[in-house]
Amino acid sequence: NVPINQRDWFIPDDNMVFWEADASQIEARITAWIAKDKNYITGFIDGRDIHTENALALFRIPEHKVHDPIEDTQYSYRDVGKRASHAINYKIGPRKLKELMNEYVPTLPFSESDAIRFIESFKDLRPGITKWWNDVFIQLKQPPERQLRNIFGRRRVFLSRMDDNLHRAAIAFLPQSAAADHINKSLVAIEQKLRATVPTASVLVQVHDSIGGQCYPDDLDLVKAIVTTEMELPLPIEFEGTPLIVPADFGSGSNWKECK
């Protein structure tokens, strides 16, 4: 994971532009649909900024401060709330959350009592998540034991003993593997269509939830159409008849960093 502030040394070939498409909040969206948390899901459908909502609830700060940088860091409260929310989605404990936050933002004092408050605030905000955790644990104990399949049907067998660590690994597997499968499925189709339609364009990099590459400026609109169409195909899961479609945020520039 190359930090965003160091991505300017990834450059395209001469006379070309760099492009990137990011699957917007894909893990959080998958988690919301799997957990069937209605408030979580409607937040995405209505276009609310879920990471801002989470940060406001966790830090208990006014909304105008959520994008303020934390002292001596490149991260905003929204960035840190996003990191904490992902961890809580996957049932992190207070001690581990405290360690994660202290490592991520050393200049922000964060105690175990802060971690407990964060976790309880998140449970109040997203009650479907707690029920989903329990459902996963029940599923792990049903025959065949220690086996799960994600929404694409990919199977994983958990070989360790049935404890909290296995439970957390199982919870994380479902959204993380589904996000990777969706991106990889899109990547195959994008490569094929670029090769057939815009052979001078190419894919250069894949990060967990994004795909990047290069093309000539005149081909940018066509590349964008191909890439976003494939990445925005529905995932194989619905909630009350609403399929999960993850928006693809497309950007371009003279280097990878400028795509954001």
Image (cartoon, rainbow, N blue to C red):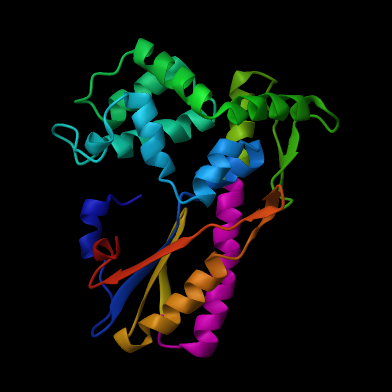
| Along the viewing direction, whichever of 230 and 164 lies nearer the viewer | 230
| Along the viewing direction, whichever of 11 and 136 lies nearer the viewer | 136
Residue positioned most to the left: 72
Q: Residue at x 22, y 35 (%)?
A: 65
Q: Quadrant of the C terminus?
A: bottom left
Examine the rendered structure and indicate whether residue 127 appears above or below residue 190: above
Residue 239 part of the magenta segment? no
Q: Position of residue 206 (x, y in %)?
A: 44, 61
Q: Magenta stretch: dominant SS? A: helix
Number of numbered markers: 0
Res 96 quadrant in image? top left
Residue 8 visible in rendering:
yes
Q: Is residue 154 left or right of residue 4?
A: right
Q: Is residue 60 left or right of residue 131?
A: left
Q: Residue at x 65, y 41 (%)?
A: 34
| Along the viewing direction, whichever of 91 and 160 lies nearer the viewer | 91
Q: Residue at x 35, y 32 (%)?
A: 55
Res 230 quadrant in image? bottom right
Residue positioned most to the top: 113
Q: Position of residue 33 (x, y in %)?
A: 63, 44
Q: Residues in magenta?
A: 177-201
Residue positioned most to the right: 143
Residue 180 part of the magenta segment? yes
Residue 83 visible in rendering:
no
Q: Position of residue 64 (x, y in %)?
A: 23, 37
Examine the rendered structure and indicate whether residue 131 appears above or below residue 22: above
